[in-house]
């Protein structure tokens, strides 16, 4: 009796599969990767087949049969990859497998299920065609249908629209043998217009050619030859990296292999997608969480069936069912969206590395601002100059110390006025949304904080105060609740206030604001298209404005409070600051008129700012790697963070101590375990955090995984949320 070993997709950490199910005759097609609906206790749950066997250790009477097999299964290598993610990120096999499922499967019994879209296609038979002229007994509608079909088969839906036929008409015609019908599958499509300039059919520059040659030379003919190298394609914005990705994908196709192209999770992906589609047509599929479920499902199946050999998408596309990928591209590899911030907290860059190694694919990571990890570990390919031959725009650091009144330095104001005078375009980046960052009472110093989180409420232009962590909203106060004073100061500023100030200063010049408030509907693309189409204007926004698009006529880029991140206690602050300034600089001066960049900051001497001002990535990375080495931060160690959260602070503290002891028991050598340290209260939950620094990744991951597994079985720790973050960002 064939047995399927099924991992039920339950979210709890307490159940460890796989479980045996007996396969009836009708399910003989079930294989590793098949997705089944199975009885589990009193429930029906979705599960993935992770193995097959001839017999079970359980007595036959205790084995249940699956209820149903879904028609689309997962390739076996993705089953392995999903299980690996569950382990590597201290999650569970079920949650890891949840990542590789076809879209729209869902995991509960009540799961919303997406199915192929089938439609009825109708065709006239010989007899049917003859009956039109033969003057047989035909109703008016029947005759109209047959006439319409004389030109060839049509969908029932089209016949209804053109010949006024209903189902009954068709059934009667079919019963008389005048038409035949069959079900056909129709592909759902999602067409989104691209943003930015696209050029096609280019001849590669010498640098591009050299980079491509290195990639192609490393590309194995098939997965048997494993050990393909990983490359870092380092090139400034506009140096032609995307062209290299396109040609690398082509090379993979020419060898009969596939390609996966990962792009950052932002609304600007259509640009890259469009370029791939123009080059490869229907061989490209896009997988993206913002597309309608039906479209996504159909795209997934096009990839699964091999009809589409290239898949482009954000981090989750690393799990696309591309058979035998020869190249895996990670565009803008520094982008933080490659890290998933909910369990399983996987890093798509690491998963891509693993998948590339397993399938003998070349990994190609591209960026203008490499992560220190990639700089240190990957083989480097350089595209040192822009394709158009233009120099990078000069970057000027504007010192805001010494009580500059207002948001903008006089020099910055002058630069904007110049843009307004000449009718040009500019971009301004300020990494905070809202109007002002917080309110304080001038008389007693009272600060308005979120009642659920230990953070300041942000004032918005509509007059409301909002928590940017939990969404709590309250009206703007008229007086201080502590001392009834009515003098309330607004401190700090965000995108909305900058927008207002620019409007006032530069009217009638148009100002476009891009942040998560301005595009609540999610359509950043629309706003960017309007900015692109306008003759002149200013684009104001959060870091989104520095990402991925190409506006040739922007001549001025400004960043406010560029060193804001440096004031946060985070070892990646320098790296982030460097990347932000460099990426923004890359948006400027891409056209005839050239451009300039102004960086407003207090800490003007910080290494990230100094190096960014000179466009000196290698200098910055050399310094940064030295600092990381001295402090034993990645890539010279691995970090694992354990966070505990709960309503009762004392219990959270005790639980954190317990987990600490469990982990500490397993440490050795130079491992460092820090904490428990408090994190700010979030959504009413008190939090504690432990941080493990280790050079032995596997052991460290195993130690934490086991400690957490023990902890979740402890009754005293129930109701606490424990989360693990391997390689926290
Ligand atoms: P990156 O991805 O590094 O920002 P792109 O590949 O988008 O750079 O190239 C920037 C612009 O230059 C694009 O409009 C692209 O079509 C064009 N381009 C790229 N390579 C060439 C080339 N070899 N010759 C002419 N134009 C090119
Ligand atoms: Zn007060
Ligand atoms: Zn809150």
Image: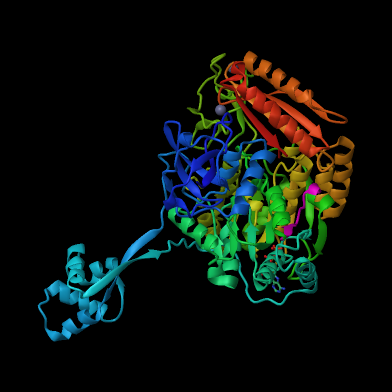
Measured from the top left, where is residue 664 in percent x and y? 78, 23
- Asked if residue 363 lies in the magenta stretch, the reply is yes
Residue farthest to the bottom, as pictured: 133
Q: Residue furthest left?
A: 137
- Side of 165 relative to 557 (left or right): left
Left or right, 595 with respect to 438, comes to right
Residue 316 included in the magenta stretch of the image: no
Note whether residue 591 is visible. no
Q: Is residue 209 visible?
A: yes
Q: Nearer the viewer, residue 180 or 628?
A: 180
Q: Is residue 403 above or below residue 656?
A: below
Residue nearest the viewer, comparing 492 with 546:
546
675 up-or-down from 366: above or below:
above
Residue at 53 percent across and 69 percent down: it is 282
Q: Work out whether 680 lies above or below 45.
A: above
Left/right of residue 142 with respect to residue 94 in the rendered view: left
* Quadrant, the C terminus: top right
**In the rendered picture of this protein, how many numbered marks are placed on residues?**
0
* Residue at horizontal 73 percent and vertical 55 percent from the top: 357
* Residue span colored magenta: 361-373
Query: Which quadrant of the frame does ligand 1 lie within?
Result: bottom right
Q: Position of residue 156 (x, y in %)?
A: 27, 67
- Give the percent coordinates (x, y) of residue 456: 61, 27
Pick the residue in front: 6 or 187. Answer: 6
Q: Is residue 174 or residue 679 the one in the foreground?
A: 174
């Amino acid at each position: 009796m064939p047995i399927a070993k099924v991992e039920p997709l339950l979210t709890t950490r307490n159940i460890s599969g796989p479980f045996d199910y007996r396969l009836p005759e009708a399910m003989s097609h079930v294989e590793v990767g098949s997705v089944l609906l199975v009885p589990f206790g009193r429930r029906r749950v979705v599960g993935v087949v992770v193995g097959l066997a001839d017999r079970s250790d359980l007595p036959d009477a205790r084995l249940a049969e699956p209820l149903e097999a879904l028609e689309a299964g997962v390739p076996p290598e993705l089953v392995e990859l999903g299980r690996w993610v569950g382990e590597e990120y201290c999650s569970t096999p079920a949650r890891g497998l949840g990542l590789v499922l076809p879209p729209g499967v869902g995991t509960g019994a009540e799961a919303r299920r997406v199915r192929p879209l089938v439609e009825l296609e109708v065709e006239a038979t010989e007899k049917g065609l003859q009956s039109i002229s033969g003057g047989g007994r035909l109703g008016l509608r029947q005759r109209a249908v047959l006439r319409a079909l004389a030109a060839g088969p049509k969908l029932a839906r089209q016949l209804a629209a053109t010949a006024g036929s209903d189902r009954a008409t068709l059934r009667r015609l079919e019963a008389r043998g005048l038409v035949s019908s069959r079900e056909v599958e129709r592909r759902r499509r999602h067409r989104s217009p691209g943003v930015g300039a696209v050029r096609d059919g280019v001849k590669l520059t010498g640098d591009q050619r050299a980079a491509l040659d290195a990639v192609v030379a490393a590309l194995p003919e098939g997965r048997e030859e494993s050990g393909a190298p990983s490359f870092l394609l380092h090139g400034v914005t506009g140096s032609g990296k995307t062209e290299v990705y396109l040609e690398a994908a082509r090379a993979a196709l020419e060898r009969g292999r596939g390609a996966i192209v990962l792009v950052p999770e932002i609304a600007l992906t259509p640009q890259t997608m469009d370029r791939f589609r123009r080059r490869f047509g229907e061989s490209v599929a896009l997988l993206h969480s913002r597309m309608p479920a039906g479209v996504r499902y159909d795209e997934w199946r096009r990839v699964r069936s091999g009809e589409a050999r290239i898949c482009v998408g954000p981090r989750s596309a690393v799990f696309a069912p591309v058979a035998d990928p020869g190249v895996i591209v990670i565009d803008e590899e520094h982008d933080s969206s490659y890290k998933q911030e909910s369990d399983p907290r996987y890093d798509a860059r690491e998963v891509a590395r693993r998948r590339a190694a397993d399938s003998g694919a070349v990994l190609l990571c591209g960026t203008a601002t490499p992560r220190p990890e990639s700089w240190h570990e990957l083989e480097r390919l350089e595209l040192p100059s822009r394709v158009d031959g233009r120099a990078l725009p000069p970057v000027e650091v504007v010192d805001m110390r010494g009580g500059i009144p207002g948001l903008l330095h006089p020099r910055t104001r002058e630069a904007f006025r110049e843009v307004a005078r000449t009718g040009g375009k500019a971009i301004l980046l300020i990494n905070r949304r809202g109007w002002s960052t917080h309110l304080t009472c001038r008389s007693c110093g009272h600060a308005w904080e979120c009642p659920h989180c230990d953070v300041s409420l942000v004032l918005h232009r509509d007059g409301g105060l909002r928590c940017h962590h939990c969404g709590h909203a309250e009206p703007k106060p008229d007086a201080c609740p502590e001392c009834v004073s009515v003098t309330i100061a607004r401190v700090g500023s965000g995108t909305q206030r900058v927008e207002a100030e620019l409007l006032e200063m530069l009217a009638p010049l148009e100002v476009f604001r891009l942040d998560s408030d301005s595009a609540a509907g999610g359509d950043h693309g629309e706003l960017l298209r309007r900015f692109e189409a306008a003759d002149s204007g200013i684009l104001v926004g959060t870091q989104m404005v520095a990402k991925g698009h190409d506006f040739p006529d922007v001549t001025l880029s400004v960043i406010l409070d560029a060193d804001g991140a440096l004031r946060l206690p985070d070892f990646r602050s320098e790296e982030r600051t460097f990347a932000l300034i460099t990426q923004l600089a890359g948006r400027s001066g891409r056209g005839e008129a050239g451009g300039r960049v102004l960086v407003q900051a207090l800490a003007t001497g910080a290494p990230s700012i100094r190096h960014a001002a000179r466009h000196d990535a290698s200098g910055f990375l050399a310094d940064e790697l030295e600092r990381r080495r001295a402090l034993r931060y990645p890539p010279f160690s691995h970090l694992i963070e354990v966070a505990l959260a709960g309503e009762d602070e004392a219990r959270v503290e005790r639980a954190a101590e317990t987990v600490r002891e469990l982990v500490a028991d397993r440490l050795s050598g130079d491992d460092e375990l820090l904490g428990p340290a408090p994190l700010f209260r979030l959504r009413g939950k008190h939090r504690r955090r432990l941080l493990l620094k280790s050079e032995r990744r596997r052991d460290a991951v195993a130690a934490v995984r086991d400690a957490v597994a023990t902890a979740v079985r402890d009754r005293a720790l129930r109701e606490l949320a424990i989360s693990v973050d391997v390689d926290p960002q």
